[in-house]
Amino acid sequence: MISNVNRVALIGTGFVGTAFAYAMVNQGITGEIILIDVNKDKAEGEAMDIAHGIPFAPSRTKVRAGDYSDCRSCDVVVITAGANQKPGETRLELLERNAQIMKGIVKQIMANYFNGILVIATNPVDILTHVAWKVSGLPKNRVIGSGTTLDTARLRHELSSYFDVDPRNVHAYIMGEHGDTEFAAWSHAFIGVRKVDDIIEQSHGRYRKEDLEQIFVKVRDAAYHIIERKGATYYGIGMALTRIIKAILNDEHSILSVSSFLGGEYGQNNIFIGVPAVVGRAGVTDVIELQLNEEEQQKLNHSVEVLKESTKPILEIL
């Protein structure tokens, strides 16, 4: 790992990858970003296009296309590459295909003596983060999935609209699988320093607890609505990934709801899943174990069971 210049490699220059690279340059997060793709012309074209905007960026960033040999000098490698579902293909078949793709990518990264942090965004992100960890041989704290970081941002956005406050003052988390079994940890939702439950209770009917469930459903199903309208989601996840990388490179020790390895936390073991965690230069330095209420703990347990059921056969065929 090179410490004098922050270097980030991106594997996959599709919609998500290029949205991430664009956000990284616009926020001036790193000294160099290297774009790697099986389609080398695509990687070169994207690098050229983004680089032409650097005179308007907050700081100078070197943007170029590269190959897996460049991973050796990188602090972080972000993987967004993956296959799209084919007509008639089952979710399990797609998962198996993406697991094999992830295996191949990670093997090439590690063959070039990478010793930094892997950040995974390819879906299903929790399972593929587990795959990347097993294949890489890296310590569990240095393999991170984007998890429910974007879902949490969506929740903060919706709550900020509902309560008419700055989303940066909304502190609430979506936990569990990045998918249909995720849930909102309402018992730990705050606006500033006030609990959301207390605000509702003291609002004299202005706010209603029933509205929270509608807000959650809107958050959980956001990707479906976006895909229905424009075909894919990429700006939000691109900015979420940028936030994770910023926390890593600046050693922020920020709390983000990333896909982290549980080794006894929340009563669960040997699973990557979205939970609040401390993220810094060493990766995930601590999993924040919230005191969930009984209903929330049951939802987390259910999410873990669903993930383990899908993960087990994938790990067996690797």
Image: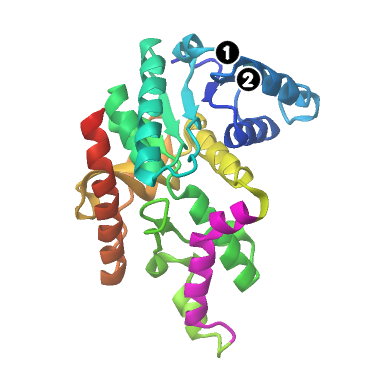
10 Å neighbourhood of mark 2: few (<14), some, or many (≥20)?
A: many
- Is 70 magenta? The answer is no
Residue at left offset 61%, top offset 72%: 162
> How far from the left and from the top, in percent, is residue 79?
48, 29
Q: Are marks 1 and 2 in contact (CB under 8 Å)?
A: yes
Q: Is residue 283 visible?
A: no
> How far from the left and from the top, in percent, is residue 17?
58, 32
What's the mark number on residue 43?
2
What's the mark number on residue 145?
none
Locate the N terminus by quadrant.
top left
Tell me the kind of residue under disc 1: Gly
Q: Which residue is mark 1?
A: 66
Residue at left offset 60%, top offset 59%: 167
Q: Nearer the viewer, residue 223 or 2?
A: 223
Relative to 101, is 43 on the left or the right? right
> How far from the left and from the top, in percent, is residue 166?
64, 62
Tell me the kind of residue under disc 2: Ala
Q: Nearer the viewer, residue 152 or 96?
A: 96
Residue at left offset 47%, top offset 25%: 76
Q: Is residue 249 visible?
A: yes
10 Å neighbourhood of mark 1: few (<14), some, or many (≥20)?
A: many
Instruction: Give the residues drawn in magenta, as a range.
Output: 206-228
Question: Separation of disc 1 and disc 2 at Cα?
Answer: 8 Å
